[in-house]
Amino acid sequence: MSLWTSAALAGAATGGRSFTGLAALALAAPADAPRQPDRTLDKPWARAVLVAAAVGELVADKLPRTPSRLAPPVLVGRLVNAAVCGLVLARRDVPASRTDVPQVFPQERDADTSDTSPTSSVTTKPVRMAPMAGAAAVSMAAAAAASFLGVHWRALAARRFRTDAVGAGLEDALTVALAAAAARR
């Protein structure tokens, strides 16, 4: 599955439930990951916090006092979480041998260095930011679309089934499935 498809799936899951995409990515984080953000997502406390937030949201979403997902603070939170999902997926797409940390070893200069001035003692290997920004943007767009579609789905389901519970349950199932598919990348 491509980075863009995974980012869209994670974003759509996040549009449905704010923390489900991040929780799925944390559960799928490589064990003993050598670099961020997976190094943090692999920690038991990080997984526990994100899974608890996702499960809590699955429950809280059904409560009558829960604010609309389209309320500006709620929607912004979903978009931020979706962007993080896109960044995590893009970061996983960069080979582990690649570095984005400045190297203070002048002898390691090669054609890939961004600073080749003879007086510089720091070489840096550029990280391609376009895939990271693109994945974040795709994920955010999918989250925004899923947020709006989710509101319309729930209204339609409530009319059709005469209760919101059926529509909410189906939306939960779809959200978890989307997040799981994105994390399997």
Image (cartoon, rainbow, N blue to C red):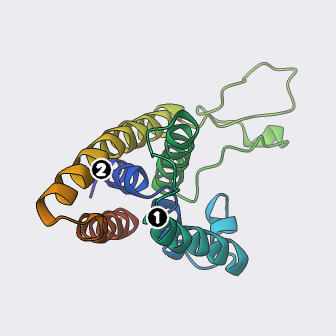
Per the image, label 2 sits on a secondary structure element best described as helix
Residue 31: quadrant of the picture: bottom right
Q: Quadrant of the C terminus?
A: bottom left
Is 78 on the left or on the right of 34, as rendered?
A: left
**As shown in the figure, which amino acid type bears the numbered disc 2?**
Gly
The quarter holding residue 174 reads bottom left
Q: In the image, residue 14 lies at what x, y percent?
A: 43, 54
Residue pointed to by mark 2: 150
In three-dimensional space, the C-alpha distance between marks 1 and 2, rounded to whole angstroms, equals 14 Å
Along the line of sight, the residue nearer the viewer: 23 or 114:
23
Question: SS for tag 1?
Answer: helix
Residue named by callout 1: 20
Residue, x 39% and y 55% (percent of image)?
A: 10
Q: Residues within 10 Å of mark 1 (few under 14, many from 20)?
A: many
Q: Residue 3, percent across and down?
A: 35, 50
Residue contact between numbered discs 1 and 2, judged by CB atoms under 8 Å? no
The image shows residue 103, relative to residue 94, as above or below, that is above
